[in-house]
Amino acid sequence: MAAKYVKLTAQAIQSAYSDYSRATQMVDATATATPDEAMVFTIEAETTGTTLDLSMFTTITQCIVVNEDATNYLEVEWYYLRGTRAAANLAFADSGTDDTITSAAADLVSSGGEAGGYVRVGSAEDAANDGTYLIQTISTTVATLASSASLTTNADDDTAILYFERRNKDRVAASKFLVLGPMAAAEDLTLTANTATTAVTVYVWGT
């Protein structure tokens, strides 16, 4: 579905009374975006986790996850895109237990890299290097990956692009919703129900 404009308005209030009479407004904020695509997904989230593929989007500007269940809470896991390192002069090293990615042309930290965050490799000369990896340590030039990573050595990759991401997790109470900002569209949205299968509606805007 084509979408030209979207506006999300959030309001927080407080009151000494359960019916919110004599309420005091604390926050009134509005976020706007100009996406060209909007999609609505109605799915069942399982207790073992259910993934929603959002790769049909190039970018995601806004997302709302609605927990339709009146009893169970919902765990939501997603990735936030912190920055990108363009292709040119990358070196991938298979070091056994601590594989590394070295950049000769750009600062990995200022590009969005952080220890404990993730780096997604795309369009690598060696397709086996494409994937999402946990960053163990990072400097301006070298990202050392967690021991679970297994790279193919390439001393001069000029096509790979690095996408630095942060993994997030939050809980949605029964009959409530969660508003997510910009997301990494290439990563799945994971929804996990508490004690029983839960109906979920997901609204996504982007390009």
Image: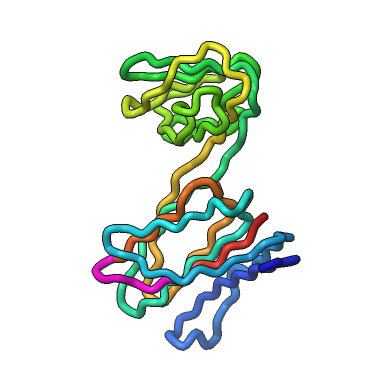
Query: In the rendered image, which quarter is residue 49 located in?
Result: bottom left
Q: Which residue occupies the foreground of this view, 101 or 157?
A: 157
Q: Which residues are magenta?
A: 194-200
Task: Give percent across and percent down for residue 63.
Answer: 56, 61
Task: Give percent across and percent down for residue 95.
Answer: 37, 14
Q: Is residue 198 magenta?
A: yes
Q: Is residue 89 magenta?
A: no
Residue in the picture at 59% in, 72% down? 11
Compared with residue 188, is residue 156 higher up or lower down, i.e. above or below?
above
Q: Is residue 198 left or right of residue 53?
A: left
Q: Is residue 202 left or right of residue 207?
A: left
**Which residue sits furthest left?**
195
Q: How is the image coloured?
A: rainbow
Residue in the picture at 37% in, 69% down? 44
Compared with residue 147, is residue 185 higher up or lower down, i.e. above or below?
below
Q: Is residue 51 left or right of residue 37?
A: left
Query: In the rendered image, which quarter is residue 7 located in?
Result: bottom right
Task: Give percent across and percent down for residue 171.
Answer: 38, 61
Quadrant in which the N terminus is drawn:
bottom right
Compared with residue 114, is residue 92 higher up or lower down, i.e. above or below?
above
